[in-house]
Every structure is written in structure tokens, then in C-alpha cells.
Amino acid sequence: MFFRFLWTLVWLLLWLVVVLLGPATLLLFGGRLASDLMATLGFGWLAFACLSLLVVLEVVLQRVWFFPGSGVPVSEDELRGRLLAVNNQAVPVRVGERRRKLTVGWRYDEVPWCELFSRRNLSNLYELRLRLDPLTRTVTLMDRRRSVQFLFCPEGVKTGWPRVVLPFLWLRLGRLGSVEQYAVTEPYLYDFHPREIKAPVMGTILASGWDVRFSLF
């Protein structure tokens, strides 16, 4: 995991060097250009820097943060079944399915979990979206967060739109676990941290023989 962080840092430093070349060039030759042209070039370079950062982050996540599965890959239906089996357990985690995509999140709007979340004064919720590719036996994980307000439970729970966030990366490959651990963890032991959702899901996927990669979109 250390080398993944190191390679990520190298990529970001290279991007920073390239981005800084633009302002340096404008400062060097700025005296020969009109002020309105300078402003246009400056805003254009700023837009390029923002867009290129998204591209660099996506490339790094796709290439550096890739994890091969172990063992013989199970079928897509079998993998879906293992993940969706979480919904049959009395746990604060649920797995939704929509348009062949899966979303793993907290049962914030169900009794008694809603009251538990409300007592913790949580202001945002973590979600993990899964895109399965049966051809390559790869699952792409995308992190999302949404704001939440617990006015009264469970009908008075208000949530915002999910927003794109940087993936949670602080995971220990040797201690990922599996979704079965949800059922053996007492409710009061949950910290409602992204790791408590992402690690078991990722561990289950890898143990099923499927590869895992991270992505922003």
C-alpha cells in the first residue's frame, strides 16, 4: 500500500510541475502581451489545470489503485448474491441494486438504525457504488457522500444529493474482512466510518476472484 501512495504522489508532483510551467511562461513573456489577452490566457490555463487534475486523478486511480482477486472467479450472479445477502441480516448496512449497479450504504432511514444515527449527530453519509464488468471480472468502486438531517425518525430524515469525493484509500489489504462480519459486529461498536463499509465489500469481491479498481466516476 505504501508504494501505491508513493506512485500517487509522483503523478501529482508531475502534474504540478506541468501546471506551473504555464504561469511561469506567462510571467516571462507577459510584458509583450496585452492585458486582456493575458487575462484570457490566465483563465484558460486555470480551466486546463482543473480539468487536467481530474484526468490525472482518474488515471492514477485506474492504474495505481488496482487490486487483483484471488482464486477462481465466481459468476456475476454469485457475486451479486453474496453482496445482496447483507439485506437479509439485521445490520445497519444495506445493498441497493439499480440498473445493474450496486450501492452499499447505511440504513439511516430504518428503525432502529435511524435513532442510532441521530444520536451520533451525523451530518453526512458515506456510500459505495459498485460497477461490475463480467467480461474482465472487475468491480469498479466509487465513493460518494451526501448530507443528512435527522428531524425525527424515520419519516423526518432529509438527505442531499450524492456528491463525488476522493476515494477512501486507507485500507489494510490483510485486514479487509468480508460482508459476513456485519452480522457479528454489535451496533454500538460501529463508528460509521467509510472503512466499515468499503473494507468488507472489497474483501468479499477479492475473495470471490474478481479484481477491484477505484474510480471517481
Image: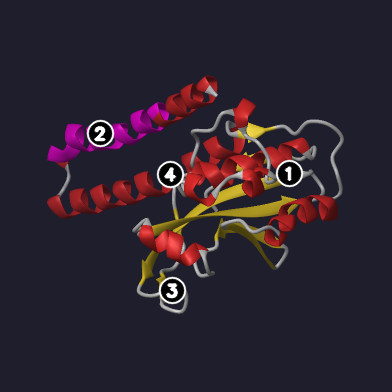
Magenta stretch: includes residue 160? no
Label 2: few (<14), some or many (≥20) within 10 Å?
Answer: few
Label 4, label 2: how far apart the Cα atoms are:
18 Å
Residue type, numbered disc 3: Cys
Most frequent secondary structure within the magenta stretch:
helix
Foreground label between 1 and 2 = 1
* Horizontal side of residue 40 vs 206, given as left or right: left
Highlighted magenta segment, given as a residue range: 13-31
Foreground label between 2 and 3 = 3
**Badge 2 is on which residue?**
25
Q: Which residue is at 64% across, 53% downward? A: 130
First in sequence, mark 3 or 4: give its number.
Answer: 4
Residue 52 numbered tag: 4
Q: Where is residue 80 in the image (x, y as percent from the top left)?
A: 77, 55
Label 1, label 3: how far apart the Cα atoms are:
38 Å
Asked whether the viewer can see residue 199, the reply is yes
**Kind of element beneath mark 4:** helix
Magenta stretch: includes residue 17? yes
Q: Where is residue 207 in the image (x, y as percent from the top left)?
A: 76, 36
Residue type, numbered disc 2: Thr
Residue type, numbered disc 4: Ser
Q: Which residue is at 72% across, 53% downward? A: 83
Which image quadrant is residue 101 in? Answer: bottom right
**Badge 1 is on which residue?**
138
First in sequence, mark 1 or 4: give its number.
Answer: 4
**Badge 3 is on which residue?**
153
Residue 159 numbered tag: none
